[in-house]
Image (cartoon, rainbow, N blue to C red):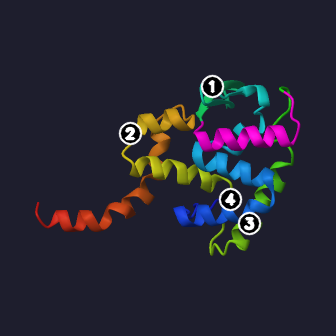
Amino acid sequence: MKTDIVPCSKEEIEKIIDASMDNDFYYLLFKVAKKTGRRLGEYYDVQVKDIDFERKVMMTKVLKRRKKVLKEALLDDELIGLLKRYIKSNNLIPDTFIFRKVAYRTIQYAISSYSKKAGIPHKVSFHNFRHYFITELSKLGYSHSDIAKLTGHSTIGVISNYDHTVASDIRDRAIRDIKNI
């Protein structure tokens, strides 16, 4: 039985990232996930050569009808700096996979471990970073269409799965405003 993801707040995401500072691989992966909102499998295939530092994009591969399709993930200056330092300190060459250092399950275990270390009271999975990214974009007023483009979704309908968390953010304001309708 699949359970719903309990969303992480900004503070919880930051605590998880801070808890991972003892490991440059996880710290980088979690920071990139927080700011790009991609699925774990999309990061897994990223090679050094897939990053265009000038254009500030990282090419990820999305499985679509059994074929890998390239999608751009935007990078800010902080991520570019972290990626450059990680690539340099690990002597990575263009054909090296950046995030394929450990297995999927190991990454999921690390998320669980770091979230416990950070004192997060609910279960956390890698997908929480994607959920957080989409929720934050929605709070900032991005349309479903724009969010779909930024996260690699092929349809905007999927984005509505994240609306319940945003609804709780507008609840108090809506209750006040409804009085005047």
- Image height of 52 relative to 85, above or below: above
Q: Amino acid at mark 4?
A: Ser
| Crowd band around label 4 with a 10 angstrom C-alpha radius: few (<14), some (14–19), many (20+) | some
The disc at residue 143 is 2
Residue at disc 4, secondary structure: loop
In terms of depth relative to the viewer, which is nearer, 118 or 4? 118
Q: Which callout, 4 or 1, points to the residue nearer the camera?
A: 1
The residue located at (31%, 65%) in the rendering is 171
Upstream in the sequence, badge 4 or badge 1?
A: 1
Say left or right for 163 vs 17. Answer: left
Report, in whole angstroms, how far the alpha carbon at label 2 lies from the one at label 4.
25 Å
The residue located at (52%, 36%) in the rendering is 150
Magenta part, dominant SS? helix
Q: Find residue 170 and report its image quarter.
A: bottom left
Q: Amino acid at mark 3?
A: Tyr
The residue located at (58%, 60%) in the rendering is 5
Residue at disc 2, secondary structure: loop
The disc at residue 54 is 1
Q: Amino acid at mark 1?
A: Glu
Upstream in the sequence, badge 3 or badge 4?
A: 3
Boundaries of the magenta span: 75-93
According to the picture, the residue beneath numbered tag 3 turns out to be 114
| Crowd band around label 3 with a 10 angstrom C-alpha radius: few (<14), some (14–19), many (20+) | many
Report, in whole angstroms, how far the alpha carbon at label 2 lies from the one at label 3.
32 Å
Q: Position of residue 141 (x, y in %)?
A: 36, 45
Upstream in the sequence, badge 2 or badge 3?
A: 3
In terms of depth relative to the viewer, which is nearer, 72 or 86? 86
The disc at residue 75 is none
Say left or right for 140 vs 178. Answer: right
| Crowd band around label 2 with a 10 angstrom C-alpha radius: few (<14), some (14–19), many (20+) | some
